[in-house]
C-alpha cells in the first residue's frame, strides 16, 4: 500500500507521491486486518434488497443489560462509541454485533481502539456490556 504495485495499484504514501501519511496507512491496514465480514454481508444484503428488517418490538431490559449500560459508561466505552453505542466521529457504532465480535475487538483492539486486558474489563463485564449493546 505504501509503495503500490507497478501497473496495478498506485503508491499511497506521501513519501512515494501519494496522499496518505504513514500513520493513516497504518490505521487503514489495521482496519482491513480486523475487518468484520458481517459488515460486508449486510451491505451485500442491502444492495440485493434482502436486508433484514429491524425488529418490531424491543426486548425488555434485563439485569445484565442494565448492568451493561452502567459498565459501558463507567469503562469509558460511551466516550468514543456514544451513550447508546450508536457511534460517533471518534468510533463506529457497535449495534448489531455479536458478543464474540465485541469480545474480539475489546481484547485485540484495532482501527485506532486500544486493546483492553481482562484486568481492565473482565469477561463477565464484557458479557454484560454485550447484553446492553445487543438490546439496543
Image (cartoon, helix red, strand yellow):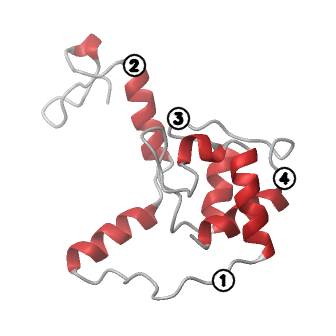
Q: 10 Å neighbourhood of mark 2: few (<14), some, or many (≥20)?
A: some
Residue that badge 4 annotates: 122
Residue drawn at 25 percent across, 25 percent down? 12
Q: Earlier in the sequence, mark 1 or mark 4?
A: 1
Q: CA distance from mark 4 to mark 2?
A: 34 Å
Above or below residue 5? Residue 81 is below
> Is residue 10 visible to the viewer in this orientation of the structure?
yes
Residue drawn at 28 percent across, 11 percent down? 15
Q: CA distance from mark 1 to mark 2?
A: 46 Å
Between disc 1 and disc 3, the foreground one is 1
Disc marking residue 22: 2
Q: CA distance from mark 1 to mark 3?
A: 33 Å
Residue drawn at 12 percent across, 33 percent down? 7
> x, y percentage for residue 85?
55, 56
Above or below residue 130? Residue 26 is above
Residue that badge 1 annotates: 60
User: Judging from the image, what secondary structure is the residue with disc 1 in?
Assistant: loop
Q: Nearer the viewer, residue 118 or 73?
A: 73
Q: Earlier in the sequence, mark 3 or mark 4?
A: 3
Q: Earlier in the sequence, mark 2 or mark 3?
A: 2
User: Judging from the image, what secondary structure is the residue with disc 2 in?
Assistant: helix
Looking at this view, name the residue that lies furthest to the bottom.
56
Residue that badge 3 annotates: 112
Q: CA distance from mark 2 to mark 3?
A: 14 Å
> x, y percentage for residue 81?
54, 47
Q: Earlier in the sequence, mark 1 or mark 3?
A: 1
Q: Quadrant of the N terminus?
A: top left
Residue drawn at 66 percent across, 83 percent down? 60
User: Judging from the image, what secondary structure is the residue with disc 3 in?
Assistant: loop
Between disc 4 and disc 2, the foreground one is 4
Q: CA distance from mark 3 to mark 4?
A: 21 Å
Amino acid at each position: 500500500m505504501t509503495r503500490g504495485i507497478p501497473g496495478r495499484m498506485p503508491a499511497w504514501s506521501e513519501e512515494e507521491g501519494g496522499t496518505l501519511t504513514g500513520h493513516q496507512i497504518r490505521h487503514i491496514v489495521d482496519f482491513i486486518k480486523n475487518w468484520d465480514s458481517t459488515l460486508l454481508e449486510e451491505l451485500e444484503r442491502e444492495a440485493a434488497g434482502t436486508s433484514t428488517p429491524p425488529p418490531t418490538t424491543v426486548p425488555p431490559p434485563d439485569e445484565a443489560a442494565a448492568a451493561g449500560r452502567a459498565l459501558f459508561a463507567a469503562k469509558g466505552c460511551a466516550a468514543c462509541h456514544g451513550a447508546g453505542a450508536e457511534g460517533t466521529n471518534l468510533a463506529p457504532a457497535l449495534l448489531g454485533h455479536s458478543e464474540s465480535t465485541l469480545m474480539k475487538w475489546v481484547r485485540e483492539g484495532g482501527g485506532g481502539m486500544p486493546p483492553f486486558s481482562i484486568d481492565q474489563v473482565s469477561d463477565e463485564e464484557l458479557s454484560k456490556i454485550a447484553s446492553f449493546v445487543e438490546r439496543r
